[in-house]
Image (spheres, rainbow, N blue to C red):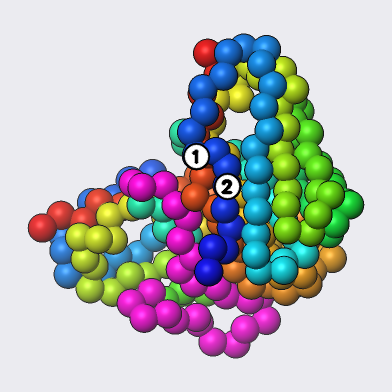
């Protein structure tokens, strides 16, 4: 079974609209972290937001927020007031907590977001 | 503030040739990782290291070797390149024992012909 599932291969959104990118995860570890990265066409990986499994509140970073629903094992990224520069690939990733999460991040296959003017 | 630097950025190899990708980080991070990114597959972990002198296999280690002789450097080697190793390779590093972000290098685009 996939550990990280992103069900939207591609999305088209009008500029200034809010966007929700879906992510569900699968783990039996009680301690884990969830991450979202942005990859523009230039190729670099840009960290957006992090949510820990024990965090009581949903994470927010500027226009980005993470809708964390632990019982449903979902960690959707919400981008408010989308901009043309938000067009990119977006990856959800998880680090499981055993050993401090030394063995890296597990990534989903990504969602290609295109913002239309 | 260089962060994570990968060398080279692009490379074309012939089948059977060998090469080494270098990853250098200046943040004194304990953990370092090599990932590969293929179309439609996301990033997959090749090998990782939890400290100087240590390495471990990730999800897709076959055909690759790694070394971490110095804390700041993590080398990825291909002894006999195959077309299936055509990919974009990313190095990343994180602090130890902390659920914080991984810092990524800019990627190396490798083509094996």
Q: Are marks 2 and 1 in contact (CB under 8 Å)?
A: yes
The location of residue A96, given as percent across then percent down, is 73, 63
Q: Residues within 10 Å of mark 1 (few under 14, many from 20)?
A: some
Q: Which structural element holds mark 1? A: loop
Region of the chain picked out in magenta, as a range: A41-64
The location of residue B60, given as percent across then percent down, is 71, 35
Whether residue B39 is visible: yes
Q: Which structural element holds mark 2? A: strand
Q: Is residue A76 above or below residue B21?
A: below
Name the disc covering residue B9, or none.
Answer: 1
The location of residue B24, given as percent across then percent down, is 65, 53
Q: How many marks?
A: 2
How far apart marks 2 and 1 lie (CA) works out to 7 Å
Name the disc covering residue B97, or none.
Answer: none
Residue drawn at 78 percent across, 34 percent down: B65
Quadrant of res A102: bottom right
Quadrant of res B44: top right
Quadrant of res B102: bottom right
Residue drawn at 72 percent across, 42 percent down: B75
Q: Which residue is mark 2?
A: B6
Q: Is residue A7 above or below residue A48?
A: above
- Give left or right: position of A102 versus A40: right
Q: Given the current orientation, which residue lies at the most extreme bottom position? A: A56
Q: Nearer the viewer, residue B10 or B86?
A: B10
Examine the structure image and report whether residue A62 is included in the region drawn in magenta.
yes
The location of residue A91, given as percent across then percent down, is 48, 54
Whether labels 2 and 1 belong to a single chain: the reply is yes
- Give left or right: position of A59 versus A12: right
Residue drawn at 25 percent across, 51 percent down: A114
Examine the structure image and report whether residue B53 is included in the region drawn in magenta.
no
């Amino acid at each position: 079974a996939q550990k990280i599932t992103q069900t939207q291969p591609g999305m088209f959104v009008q500029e200034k609209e809010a966007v929700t990118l879906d992510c569900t995860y699968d783990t039996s570890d009680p301690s884990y972290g969830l991450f979202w990265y942005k990859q523009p066409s230039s190729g670099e990986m840009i960290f957006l937001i992090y949510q820990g499994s024990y965090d009581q509140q949903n994470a927010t970073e500027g226009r980005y927020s993470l809708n964390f629903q632990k019982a449903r094992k979902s960690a959707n990224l919400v981008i408010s007031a989308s901009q043309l520069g938000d067009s990119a690939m977006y990856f959800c990733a998880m680090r499981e907590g055993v050993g401090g999460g030394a063995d890296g991040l597990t990534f989903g296959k990504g969602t290609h977001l295109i913002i239309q003017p | 503030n260089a962060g994570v630097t990968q060398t080279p950025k692009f490379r074309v190899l012939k089948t059977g040739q060998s090469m080494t990708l270098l990853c250098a980080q200046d943040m004194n991070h304990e953990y370092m990782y090599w990932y590969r990114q293929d179309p439609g597959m996301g990033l997959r972990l090749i090998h990782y290291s939890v400290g100087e002198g240590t390495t471990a296999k990730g999800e897709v280690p076959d055909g690759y070797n790694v070394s971490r002789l110095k804390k700041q450097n993590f080398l990825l080697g291909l002894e006999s390149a195959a077309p299936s190793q055509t990919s974009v390779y990313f190095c990343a590093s994180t602090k130890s024992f902390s659920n914080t972000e991984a810092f990524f290098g800019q990627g190396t685009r490798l083509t094996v012909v």
